[in-house]
Image (spheres, rainbow, N blue to C red):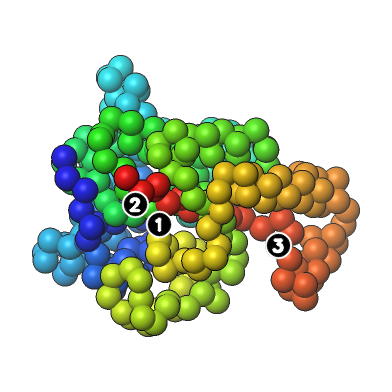
């Protein structure tokens, strides 16, 4: 099995915000999307890239290797009617969205064996994972291949410190030793470095739901070791408990607007949402 320097996995394609950037940078992309309408839209949007062999859409919901081995081939997927980016296979995530006023409808989609995808398409240079509660099963699939991506990113667990530490444990056990947190609400203000350190030089304006810069294009001084990133995680979890979804503060009428104004004028995410980027240790 080969690791390809020109290949990126976009796990959680959504509307192609990230794939468009990766293709512009000259990478080939294998995209994964469980939402049937979004997968179809992606095939139409990047039809030219697909004909050129630069884009592949894998439609379905990623499951763990143990589930696939047990014969699971269909998955219940919850399509969020208000925010399609919140689609998930996790019932508790769908319930959480419902409590926030965003209800979901359940559909049956095909299961995707991520290990087979790694074997068929190869190990990518960078793997972006954002599939609402199932990110870690993609990481677990890396145990079934010899090589690892040079960089990966996952949506950070911010509510429970123990879960965040478990994410770091898993990444470390896979050989990742450097970490960087990216505040996602700040992504639209990112600018692609020139000269670029990833792929070919380009200009790009990131959309609000985009994951943004990755790999060597992230600020060099932003990388931290396990202890450094764990300390940042603790601060994020504390902010989540104090002013995040479900906190007592959020139940005060009008407080959400007040917190938004504080964030706007101070630049301090309250609590914000983050992606954790991890860099593979040198061989």
Q: Above or below — where is 252 with respect to 52?
A: above
Residue 157 visible in the picture? no
Q: Nearer the viewer, mark 3 or mark 2?
A: 2
Q: Which mark is residue 276?
A: none
Q: Which residue is mark 1?
A: 14
Q: Earlier in the sequence, mark 3 or mark 2?
A: 2
> How far separated are the C-alphas under marks 2 and 1?
23 Å
Q: Residue at x 22, y 60 (%)?
A: 6
Q: Give the class, few, some or many, for how many residues have Cα within 10 Å of label 1's Cα (few <14, many ≥20).
A: many
Q: Is residue 165 left or right of residue 130?
A: right
Of 144 and 46, which appears nearest the observer? 144
Position of residue 132 in the picture relative to residue 38 (left or right): right
Is label 1 in a helix, a strand or a loop? loop
Residue topped by disc 2: 150
Write down the residue under mark 3.
269
Q: Are marks 3 and 2 in contact (CB under 8 Å)?
A: no
Q: Secondary structure at mark 2?
A: loop
Q: Position of residue 250 (x, y in %)?
A: 81, 52
- Residue situated in front as seen by the camera: 56 or 120: 120
What's the residue at 32%, 45% (across, down)? 283
Residue 138 visible = yes
Under tag 3, what secondary structure? Answer: loop
Query: x, y (%) of residue 73?
Result: 28, 27
Q: Earlier in the sequence, mark 2 or mark 1?
A: 1
* Residue appearing at x 27%, y 75% in the figure: 200
Q: Residue furthest top?
A: 70
């Amino acid at each position: 099995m080969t690791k390809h320097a020109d290949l990126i996995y976009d796990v959680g394609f959504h509307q192609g915000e990230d794939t468009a950037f990766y293709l512009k940078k000259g990478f080939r992309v294998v995209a994964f999307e469980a939402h049937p309408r979004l997968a179809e839209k992606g095939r139409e949007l990047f039809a030219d890239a697909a004909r050129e062999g630069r884009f592949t859409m894998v439609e379905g919901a990623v499951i763990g290797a143990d589930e696939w081995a047990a014969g699971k081939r269909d998955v219940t997927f919850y399509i969020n009617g208000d925010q399609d980016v919140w689609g998930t296979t996790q019932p508790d995530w769908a319930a959480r969205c419902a409590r926030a006023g965003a209800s979901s409808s359940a559909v049956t989609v095909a299961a995707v064996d991520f290990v087979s995808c790694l074997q068929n398409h190869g190990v990518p240079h960078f793997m972006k994972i954002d599939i609402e509660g199932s990110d870690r099963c993609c990481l677990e699939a890396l145990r079934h291949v010899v090589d690892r991506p040079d960089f990966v990113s996952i949506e950070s667990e911010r509510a429970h410190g123990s879960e965040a530490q478990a994410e770091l444990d898993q990444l470390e056990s896979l050989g990742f030793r450097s970490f960087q947190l990216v505040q996602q609400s700040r992504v639209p203000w990112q600018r692609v470095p020139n000269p670029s350190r990833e792929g070919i030089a380009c200009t790009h304006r990131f959309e609000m739901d985009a994951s943004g810069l990755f790999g060597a294009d992230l600020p060099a001084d932003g990388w931290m070791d396990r202890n450094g990133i764990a300390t940042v995680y603790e601060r994020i979890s504390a902010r989540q408990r104090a002013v995040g979804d479900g906190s007592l503060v959020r139940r005060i009428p009008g407080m959400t607007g007040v917190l938004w104004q504080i964030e706007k004028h101070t630049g301090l995410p309250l609590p914000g949402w983050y992606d954790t980027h991890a860099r593979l240790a040198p061989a």
